[in-house]
Image (cartoon, rainbow, N blue to C red):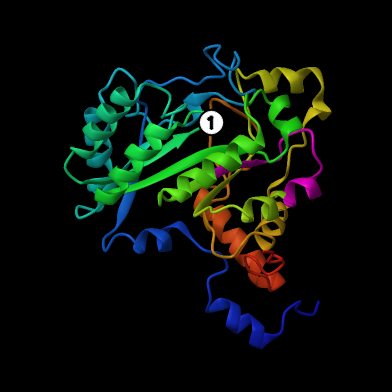
Amino acid sequence: MKSQVSDSKKVHLAQQPLYRAFNDFLKEYFPFKVQKISLHAGFTCPNRDGKVGLGGCTYCNNQTFNPAYCQTEKSITQQLEEGIRFFGKKYPQMKYLAYFQAYTNTYGTLENLKRQYQEALSVPGVVGLVIGTRPDSMWPELYQYLAELNKRTFVLVEYGLESCYDDVLQLINRGHRYQDSVEAIMTTASYGIPVGAHMILGLPGRSEEEQIAQAEMISALPLNTLKLHQLQLIKGTKMMHQVAENPSFVRTYQVDEYIDFVIAFLRRLRPDIVVERFVSQSPDDLLVAPRWGVKNYEFVDKVKQKMRIKGVVQGDSYVYTK
């Protein structure tokens, strides 16, 4: 079989980044190695406690997010110190970002949020915050506080978009509209705060091509970073019950199929958006499907290898619009 890409182009691709990676993004802010440490600060979500809905997102089991040290009975300081001890064994000079990950980490009073963020920043070795939240859990005073904090330390706000389609957001009980995400991202960026997004590929309700088209939709937003996750079926979730009743409710991708999905998405994504990850790994005892047996770094290697074979890079099919 003849190669799909000329030898000269293969050499060129081997020498350039195939996509913009998160580590390169962090190097723009820090002259040293930085590691995120996940925290569970005891927050809930407005689609769990009845403010906008009950039951949470249909795919969600937050146990899948948290390492062993990340437990609500431990203080933020204790969680960070345990995480630092874990990572510090291999990289003694490493610094850390406190990653407020589980649930909605701006869902509380401003004074309570300030206490939690400042506690994290007071731990030796912590050089910034990453705050995972929802677009419907932000307000003017919080934007202003985070903008001031961002002048003194690194702050990245990550929004769970999950989908650009309102019918999909309703189907998964997300409890907000895509326009809410657009407005939150625009406002965050207007304050000079780095802003990221999470999206899940493989959600029910839209075709694969419609999901790939979301790359161009979010490229119109002032995003700095993006996380892509495959849809995972997790024990104890509503979606798992929906699939048990109707196996065709969602498509379960094989690893090579999902790699093609990711690459198609990347090609239509604005080339300067940082892609932090392609996949998520849930604990083995909770994960039902897909069970690929591929570690994150192995998946990244497979994506890079296939992009080189195809002769493609992030954004090579993106159409710039004013």
26 vs 245: above or below? below
Quarter of the view holding residue 202: top right
Viewer-closest of 112 and 288: 112
Identified at 43% across, 24% down, the residue is 107
Q: Position of residue 297 (x, y in %)?
A: 50, 54
**Left or right of 142 on screen, residue 207:** right
Give the position of the C terminus as an image quadrant: bottom right
Q: Is residue 206 magenta?
A: yes
Question: Along the horizontal axis of the image, is 11 left or right of 209?
Answer: left
- Is residue 256 positioned above or below 182 on the image? below
- Image label count: 1
Answer with left or right where residue 100 lies relative to residue 162: left
Instruction: Please report the residue visible at 54 percent of the width from the left and 23 percent of the height from the top.
Output: 61
Give the image quarter of residue 267. bottom right
On-image quarter of the N terminus: bottom right
Q: x, y (%) of residue 183?
A: 57, 40
| Vertical placement of residue 229 versus 260, above or below | above
The image shows residue 241 at horizontal and vertical percentages of: 71, 17
Mark 1 is on which residue type? Asp
Question: Which residue lies under the disc numbered 1?
Answer: 284
- Residue at 73% x, 38% y is 165
Tell me if residue 37 can be seen.
no
Please say whether residue 78 is visible from this viewpoint. Answer: yes
Percent from the top left, x then y, of residue 113? Answer: 32, 27
Does 94 sit left or right of 322 as displayed? left
> Which element is circle 1 on?
loop
Quadrant of the image occupied by residue 265: bottom right
Reply yes or no: does residue 160 show up in magenta. no
Instruction: Read off the magenta span.
Output: 197-213
Dot 1: within a 10 Å radius of its alpha carbon, few (fewer than 14), some, or many (20 or more) residues? few
